[in-house]
Amino acid sequence: MQRKNLILPELLVNVLFFALAAAILVQVFALAYSEGLKNRVKTEAMLRVQNVVEEVKADPCSAETVLLAAGFQTGHGRIFCSYDAEWNAAANGRYEISLELRQTPAETGHLFEIAVACTDLELEETMASLSTSVYQRGAG
Amino acid sequence: MKQRNHPINGALSLLLITAFAILSLLLVLIGVRAYRAVTAISEENQRLRISFSYLANKVRSAPDGVLLETREGIPVLALAEQVNGNTYETLVYFSNGELREQFAKAGQDFAAENGEAITELEACSFSMEEERLCVSVVDSGGTPHTMTLTLPSVEQEVR
């Protein structure tokens, strides 16, 4: 008889335990989904950063002109462009791709140091960054 | 002394079990949906990364440059190389929803279906702008992604 009375509390404990497990599981699913979306953004960010690096490496001397024509802006010693969440160029957007180009004169040419980064302005987090250098003979 | 089992206890237990079963089923369904969404996103990411890194590595490691040609109406990236005095070509192209690669002796007949599938894509196109190769890929969601590669020497040719 004592055993029969225990059925309801036992059930309640079981349900509570499974409810807790379900809550944790839903949270994990949501986290995995948001991480997947974040990864997609990171892939796109890295692709865009790579494209800017390739553009600068092709001709570092005229890179600024080419990028400005492509919608980039200059300010605070860097060239930058901001994008909205759908990666369309927009003022005060969510993501920003910035380029820092340093030119060091050498004996027979110039050394160009290129640093490109993509930042999530909302999270204040660097999504992707690349830096490289190119030596150009007789460039100036 | 005998305690009477109240009928409401049984009903409540049954109700609890039913609610538990329904909620468990709901949770499983939500889980399946979330899992499918997560794997779809990661698969899409992987496809995009594989296709771009494969193309970038192939193009950068091409010893004799890259040609953008049209063979049998299909835009093809032709990467030539010398093997034992013979010229061989690695042809990279998009056909039937797949990015494909074909390695053959230069001058051999081209058949798109003979190529080895690298990855599935919604769409993929190549274009040359001055000394840059632009690769545009469309993912299953219809979003276009573009990669630019700077080439040391490129030529455009239509066969």
Image: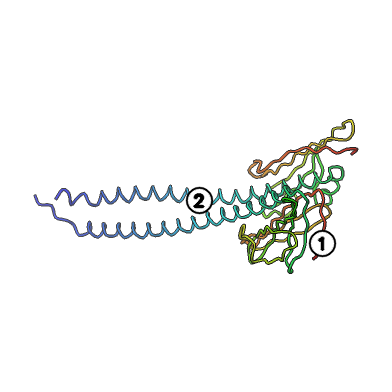
Report the label total: 2
Percent position (x, y) of residue B132?
A: 79, 52
Q: Chain of mark 2?
A: A
For the point 41% across and 59% down, the residue is B26
In screen coordinates, is B101 left or right of B20? right
Callout 1 and callout 2 share a chain:
no
Q: Is residue A126 left or right of residue A98?
A: left
State whether residue B159 is above or below residue A38: below
Image disc number at residue A30: 2
**Quarter of the figure with residue B125:** bottom right
Q: Amino acid at mark 1?
A: Glu
Q: Which mark is residue A136?
A: none
Q: Secondary structure at mark 2?
A: helix
Foreground of the two, A5 or B73: B73
Mark 1 lies on a secondary structure that is loop
Instruction: Identify the disc placed on residue B157.
Output: 1
User: Most extreme residue toward the top, as rendered?
Assistant: A107
Pick the front one: A60 or B59: B59
Q: Nearer the viewer, mark 1 or mark 2?
A: 1
- In the rendered structure, the answer to whether residue B106 lies left or right of residue B142 reads right
Residues marked 1 and 2 touching at CB (< 8 Å): no
> Which residue is depicted at the point 34% across and 56% down?
B20
| Percent coordinates x, y for residue A80 in the rendering | 77, 44
Residue at image location 59% in from the left, 56% down from the top: B44
Q: Is residue A140 visible?
A: no
Residue at the extreme left: B1
